[in-house]
Image (spheres, rainbow, N blue to C red):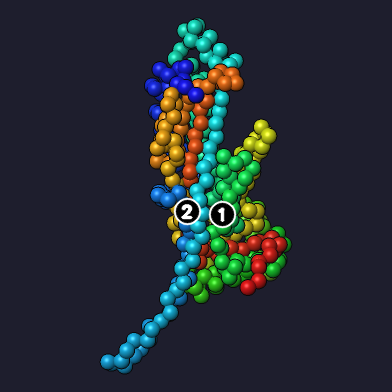
C-alpha cells in the first residue's frame, strides 16, 4: 500500500469529514438512535480485555448489642465477574479502477471541487457509522438476552461469545403469553417488581419491543386499569387498545416504572446483500433500576502504535481509527476503512430483571 493518489484532498478533508460524521452520530436530532451511547460510559482498557462485575450484596440490618459488647461478624457479599478479550471490528470500502478513472475525468473537466470530494469520500460516513451500528447491535442483543457475539474482522465467520451472566433468579417467564387478552400482564410483571423489592431494588424502566407493548395495551387488564385511572368503573369497559403514553400513565401512577420501546433495526451485509435485523429479542422485557448499565470498553489498535507508511490516519473518539490508502495489486484501487477494538459491557446484572412475555423461554434449573 502507498499514499492516496489524491493526497491533496485527503490531507485537506479526511480528518474533518471523520469528525463531522462523529458529530452527526452524537447529534440528538439524529434519526438513528444509539441507546448504548445513553446507557453506557466510555472506558479504556490497557490490557485489551473487558470485564463485567456483579455484586451479590447481602444487605442486612445492623444488630443491636449491649454496651461494651463486641459487634457480630457478618458475611460479605460475593463479587462475580465475566471477562474476555476485546476483538477488532471494522469495515472497508474500495474505489476500483473504473471509479478512479471517473474521478480523473472529473478533474480533467474542471468539475467543482465539492463534487470531486463528495465522490472520493462517499464511503467514509458508512465506514465510521458502521462501527457505531455494530456496537448498537451488540448492546441491544446483550440487553435483551444477557449474551452477544463479537465478530472478529480477522476471522471471518468466527464469533467471540460474550455472556454477562444475567442471574437465573432474576429471569421470569410469562405463565400466559401476553398476546392473550386475558393474560393479566401487570400481575406477571409484578413478579419482577416483587423480586427487585426483595433485593432492595426499585425498577424504574422496562425496555421491550413495540409488539409486546401492543399486546399489553390490548389486554383486558390494561384497559381496566386505564379506565380506573380515569375514574370509570363498570363491567362493560369499551376502551380501545392503549398506546405507549396511556400505558405509562398507568404504570407510573400505580407501579412507579415506565415502559421504554425499542424498535431499532441494524443492517448487516451477508453475501453482498444488506439485510435489516432487529437485535432486541422479540417478547423480551428488561427491568432496570438505573440509567447507567455499564461501559463500552475500548483498547488501542496495533496500527495506532505502528502506523503503516503511506497510509493517512485519523482517530475519532479515541477508539475508531479511520484510514485511506492506495494499492496496485492485484489492480489499482483506493481504500477507505474504519476499525476499532471496542465492545459494550453490561455490569451490575444483579439489579437487572428480565421476563419472556411469550412464555417460551426455558430457564436452567439450579
Q: Residue 111 at what x, y percent from top left?
A: 48, 10
Q: Secondary structure at mark 1?
A: strand
**Crowding near pointer 1: few (<14 within 10 Å), some, many (20+)?**
many
In this view of the protein, can residue 302 be seen by the observer? yes
**Crowding near pointer 2: few (<14 within 10 Å), some, many (20+)?**
many
Q: In the depicted view, which residue is nearer to us: 333 or 354? A: 333
Give the residue number, with chain letter if any, for mark 2.
50
Give the residue number, with chain letter if any, for mark 1.
162
Using the rendered view, name the quadrant where residue 242 is placed. bottom right
Q: Do the residues bearing badges 2 and 1 touch, measured as CB atoms within 8 Å? A: yes
Q: Residue furthest top?
A: 109
User: Rounded to the nearest whole Å, what is the CA distance between mark 2 and mark 1?
Assistant: 10 Å
Q: Residue at x 51, y 75 (%)?
A: 198
Q: In the depicted view, which residue is nearer to us: 151 or 131? A: 151
Note whether 149 is above or below 359 in the view shown. Answer: above
In this view of the protein, can residue 30 be seen by the observer? no
Q: Which label belongs to residue 366? A: none
Q: Is residue 41 left or right of residue 244?
A: left
Q: Is residue 195 left or right of residue 10?
A: right
Amino acid at each position: 500500500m502507498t499514499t492516496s493518489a489524491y493526497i491533496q484532498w485527503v490531507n485537506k478533508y479526511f480528518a474533518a469529514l471523520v469528525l463531522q460524521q462523529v458529530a452527526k452520530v452524537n447529534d440528538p436530532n439524529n434519526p438513528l438512535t444509539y441507546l448504548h451511547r445513553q446507557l453506557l460510559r466510555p472506558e479504556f482498557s490497557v490490557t485489551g480485555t473487558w470485564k463485567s462485575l456483579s455484586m451479590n450484596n447481602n444487605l442486612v440490618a445492623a444488630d443491636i448489642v449491649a454496651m461494651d459488647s463486641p459487634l457480630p461478624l457478618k458475611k460479605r457479599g460475593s463479587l462475580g465477574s465475566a471477562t474476555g478479550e476485546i476483538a477488532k471490528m471494522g469495515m472497508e470500502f474500495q474505489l476500483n479502477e473504473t471509479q478512479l478513472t471517473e474521478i480523473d475525468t472529473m478533474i480533467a473537466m474542471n468539475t467543482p471541487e465539492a463534487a470531486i470530494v463528495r465522490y472520493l469520500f462517499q464511503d467514509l460516513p458508512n465506514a465510521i457509522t458502521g462501527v457505531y451500528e455494530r456496537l448498537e447491535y451488540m448492546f441491544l442483543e446483550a440487553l435483551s438476552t444477557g449474551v452477544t457475539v463479537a465478530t472478529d474482522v480477522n476471522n471471518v465467520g468466527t464469533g467471540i461469545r460474550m455472556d454477562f451472566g444475567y442471574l437465573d433468579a432474576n429471569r421470569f417467564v410469562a405463565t400466559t403469553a401476553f398476546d392473550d387478552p386475558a393474560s393479566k400482564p401487570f400481575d406477571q410483571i409484578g413478579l419482577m417488581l416483587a423480586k427487585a423489592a426483595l433485593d432492595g431494588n426499585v425498577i424504574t424502566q422496562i425496555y421491550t419491543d413495540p409488539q409486546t407493548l401492543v399486546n399489553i395495551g390490548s389486554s383486558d387488564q390494561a384497559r381496566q386499569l386505564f379506565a380506573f385511572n380515569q375514574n370509570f368503573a363498570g363491567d362493560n369497559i369499551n376502551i380501545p387498545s392503549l398506546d405507549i403514553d396511556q400505558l405509562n400513565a398507568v404504570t407510573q401512577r400505580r407501579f412507579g416504572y415506565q415502559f421504554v420501546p425499542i424498535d431499532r433495526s441494524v443492517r448487516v451485509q451477508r453475501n453482498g446483500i444488506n439485510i435489516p435485523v432487529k437485535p432486541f429479542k422479540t417478547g423480551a422485557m428488561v427491568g432496570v433500576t438505573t440509567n447507567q448499565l455499564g461501559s463500552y470498553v475500548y483498547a488501542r489498535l496495533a496500527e495506532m502504535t505502528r502506523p503503516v507508511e503511506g497510509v493517512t490516519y485519523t482517530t475519532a473518539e479515541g477508539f475508531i481509527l479511520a484510514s485511506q490508502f492506495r494499492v496496485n495489486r492485484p489492480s489499482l484501487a483506493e481504500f477507505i476503512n474504519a476499525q476499532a477494538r471496542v465492545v459494550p459491557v453490561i455490569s451490575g446484572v444483579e439489579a437487572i430483571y428480565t421476563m419472556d412475555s411469550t412464555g417460551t423461554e426455558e430457564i436452567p434449573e439450579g
